[in-house]
Amino acid sequence: MTERSVLAFPSLPLPFFLESGKTHYMPGESHPNRRNLGVFDLILVQSGCLFLGEERQHWKLCAGDMVVLLPDAYHFAVQDCREETSFYWLHFQTLTPGITGHDSISHNIELPKQGRIPYPEQVYQQFESLHLLATEPRSTAFWREQTLFIELLQLLDPSRSDQEQSRVRKVAEQVESYIKMHYREPISNARLSADLHFHYNYLTRCMKESHGVTPTEYLLQYRLDQAKRLLLTTRWSMSHIAEHVGFQYPPYFSRRFSARFGLSPLQFRKQYTE
C-alpha cells in the first residue's frame, strides 16, 4: 500500500462523528488486530507508547502522536505495550472516501495520516468533552458531538499551519477588519491599498482565496447586512439608513438590497416588524 501522509475529505458533505472513547493498556497488552473495520479510526496517544501497523506500515506512537486508520485496511499490533499506555480513539465516517490532494471544490478538510498533534492540550480537552456527552441522551448529545468533532478536525487540519495560507488568511482578515471599521465611509480601491500597504490586486486575491469574494463585494454585503439590522431595530427612513451604512444614493441602495434579499427595504421591514 502506498503511504498517504495527508488524508483529504471534501468539505461537503462533512465527515460525521460516530463514537469515541479512551483506552488504557498495561505493559504486555496490545491493540486488537482488525480487518475492514468500515469506519475511520482516529487514535491520539496521551501517555506511553502504542505500537501499531496498517498493511505494510508500522508506527511507534508516543504521547502527542496521532494516526488515522483506514476503513478498508488491515490494522494490527506490531508488539505489546512496554509501559502503561493511554490513548483516545474516535470513529468517524464520510459519504466520500478519503483522497490525497485537492479537487474542484473550494476547500478540503485535511488530516495527517500520522504525525504529531499540533495542539495536544486542546485536542485532549475536546475528547474529554466528547466523553462526557456519551452519558447524555442521544437526542441531546447528537448536535454537540458533531460540533465538537468538526472543531477537532479544525485543530488537526495541517493546512492551518501552512505559512502561505496563513499569510493570505491574515491579509484577508485585515481587509475584513478594515471594512467593518470604515464601512460607513467612502472606501475606494486606492484607499484600501494605501491604508493596508498592499497592492489592490493582492488584497483581492487574498479575499477571494480566504472569503470567496472581492473586497468590493464584501463591503457591499457588509453594508447591506448592517442596513438589514437597522431596518429591524430602528424607525429610521430608508434614505437615512442608506446614508448611515455608506450608500450615497438611496435608489441604488434599494436596488442592491432587493437583489440580495428578494425584497425591497420597505417590504423587508413590513414583513418582520408588523
Image: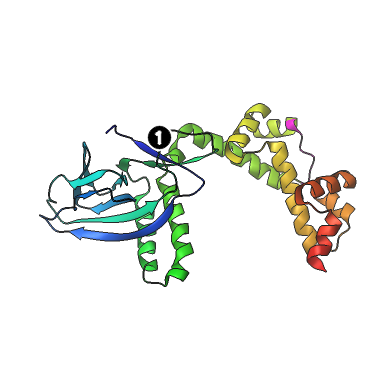
Q: Secondary structure at mark 1?
A: loop
Tell me if residue 139 comes above or below residue 79 in the rendering: below
Q: For residue 31: magenta?
A: no
Residue 222 location (% of width, % of height) = 72, 47
User: Which residue is labeled 1 in the image?
Assistant: 100
Residue 32 location (% of width, % of height) = 19, 53
Tell me if residue 127 comes above or below residue 97 in the rendering: below
Residue 38 location (% of width, % of height) = 32, 50
User: Residue 261, can we see it?
Assistant: yes
Q: Is residue 175 left or right of residue 67?
A: right
Q: Amino acid at mark 1?
A: Thr
Residue 209 location, quadrant: top right
Residue 203 location, quadrant: top right
Residue placed most toward the observer, 203 or 69: 69
Magenta range is 184-189
Quarter holding the C terminus is bottom right
Tell me what residue is drawn at x 74 percent, y 53 percent.
226
Residue 2 location (% of width, % of height) = 29, 32
User: Residue 199, can we see it?
Assistant: no
Q: Is residue 177 left or right of residue 136?
A: right
Total number of numbered labels? 1
Tell me what residue is drawn at x 70 percent, y 43 percent.
179
Quarter holding the N terminus is top left
| Main SS of residues in magenta | loop
Tell me what residue is drawn at x 50 percent, y 48 percent.
13
Residue placed most toward the observer, 233 or 88: 88
Report crowding for label 1: few under 14, some 14 to 19, many 20 or more residues within 10 A (C-alpha): few
Residue at the far left: name it.
Answer: 28
Tell me what residue is drawn at x 42 percent, y 49 percent.
94
Residue placed most toward the observer, 217 or 73: 73
